[in-house]
Amino acid sequence: MSRSAVSHHLQSLKNAGLLQIRKEGTKNYYSIKKQTMIFYQMKEMFFKIECTIKEKQNLAQ
Protein backbone atom coordinates (compact mmCIF):
# COMPACT_ATOMS: atom_id res chain seq x y z
CA MET A 1 0.00 0.00 0.00
CA SER A 2 1.29 3.45 -0.77
CA ARG A 3 2.09 5.95 1.97
CA SER A 4 -0.71 8.23 0.84
CA ALA A 5 -3.23 5.35 0.93
CA VAL A 6 -2.16 4.39 4.47
CA SER A 7 -2.35 8.03 5.54
CA HIS A 8 -5.85 8.33 4.05
CA HIS A 9 -7.07 5.21 5.87
CA LEU A 10 -5.56 6.35 9.17
CA GLN A 11 -7.21 9.75 8.77
CA SER A 12 -10.57 8.02 8.11
CA LEU A 13 -10.18 5.96 11.29
CA LYS A 14 -9.27 9.12 13.23
CA ASN A 15 -12.32 10.93 11.86
CA ALA A 16 -14.48 7.98 12.92
CA GLY A 17 -13.19 8.48 16.48
CA LEU A 18 -11.25 5.22 16.65
CA LEU A 19 -7.70 6.58 16.68
CA GLN A 20 -5.79 9.33 18.38
CA ILE A 21 -2.71 11.06 17.01
CA ARG A 22 0.42 12.20 18.82
CA LYS A 23 2.63 14.50 16.75
CA GLU A 24 6.36 14.76 17.27
CA GLY A 25 8.05 17.09 14.83
CA THR A 26 7.18 15.90 11.35
CA LYS A 27 6.05 12.45 12.50
CA ASN A 28 2.57 11.35 13.54
CA TYR A 29 2.06 8.44 15.93
CA TYR A 30 -1.33 6.77 15.78
CA SER A 31 -2.85 4.67 18.53
CA ILE A 32 -6.23 3.12 19.22
CA LYS A 33 -8.28 5.14 21.67
CA LYS A 34 -8.66 3.43 25.02
CA GLN A 35 -12.47 3.60 24.77
CA THR A 36 -12.33 1.84 21.39
CA MET A 37 -10.17 -0.96 22.77
CA ILE A 38 -12.52 -1.48 25.71
CA PHE A 39 -15.50 -1.61 23.33
CA TYR A 40 -13.92 -4.33 21.20
CA GLN A 41 -12.80 -6.29 24.27
CA MET A 42 -16.36 -6.19 25.60
CA LYS A 43 -17.74 -7.19 22.21
CA GLU A 44 -15.37 -10.18 22.13
CA MET A 45 -16.32 -11.15 25.68
CA PHE A 46 -20.05 -11.08 24.88
CA PHE A 47 -19.43 -13.10 21.73
CA LYS A 48 -17.63 -15.78 23.78
CA ILE A 49 -20.45 -15.83 26.33
CA GLU A 50 -23.00 -16.21 23.55
CA CYS A 51 -21.04 -19.10 22.02
CA THR A 52 -20.79 -20.82 25.41
CA ILE A 53 -24.54 -20.49 26.00
CA LYS A 54 -25.33 -21.88 22.53
CA GLU A 55 -22.91 -24.74 23.06
CA LYS A 56 -24.52 -25.65 26.39
CA GLN A 57 -27.98 -25.46 24.83
CA ASN A 58 -26.89 -27.82 22.05
CA LEU A 59 -25.46 -30.29 24.59
CA ALA A 60 -28.69 -30.20 26.58
CA GLN A 61 -30.77 -31.21 23.54
Image (cartoon, helix red, strand yellow):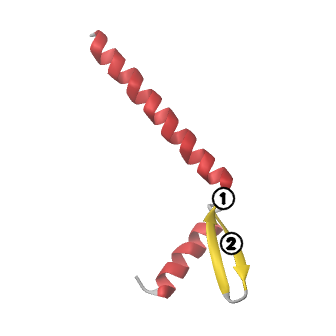
**Which residue was labeled with disc 2?**
21
Say what secondary structure mark 1 lies in. loop
Classify the position of the N terminus by image quarter: bottom left
Q: In the image, is residue 57 above or below residue 7?
A: above
Residue 7: percent from the left, percent from the top? 54, 81
Tag shown at residue 8? none
Q: Nearer the viewer, residue 53 or 29?
A: 29
Please report contact status of discs 1 and 2: CB closer than 8 Å, yes or no.
Answer: no
Q: Nearer the viewer, residue 27 or 47?
A: 27
Say what secondary structure mark 2 lies in. strand
Amino acid found under the numbered disc labelled 1: Lys
**Which residue was labeled with disc 1?**
33
**Of callouts 1 and 2, the N-terminal one:** 2
What residue appears at the point 41 percent right and 21 percent down from the top-left corner? Answer: 53
Residue 36: percent from the left, percent from the top? 62, 53
Classify the position of the C terminus by image quarter: top left
Amino acid found under the numbered disc labelled 2: Ile
Dot 1, how many residues are within 10 Å of its Cα: few (below 14), some (14-19), or many (20+)? some
What residue appears at the point 56 percent right and 73 percent down from the top-left corner? Answer: 10
Residue 39: percent from the left, percent from the top? 60, 46
Q: CA distance from mark 1 to mark 2?
A: 9 Å
Q: In the image, is residue 46 above or below residue 59?
A: below
> Which quadrant holds residue 34?
bottom right
**Left or right: 54 in relation to 3:** left
Residue 14: percent from the left, percent from the top? 63, 69
**Left or right: 24 in relation to 19:** right
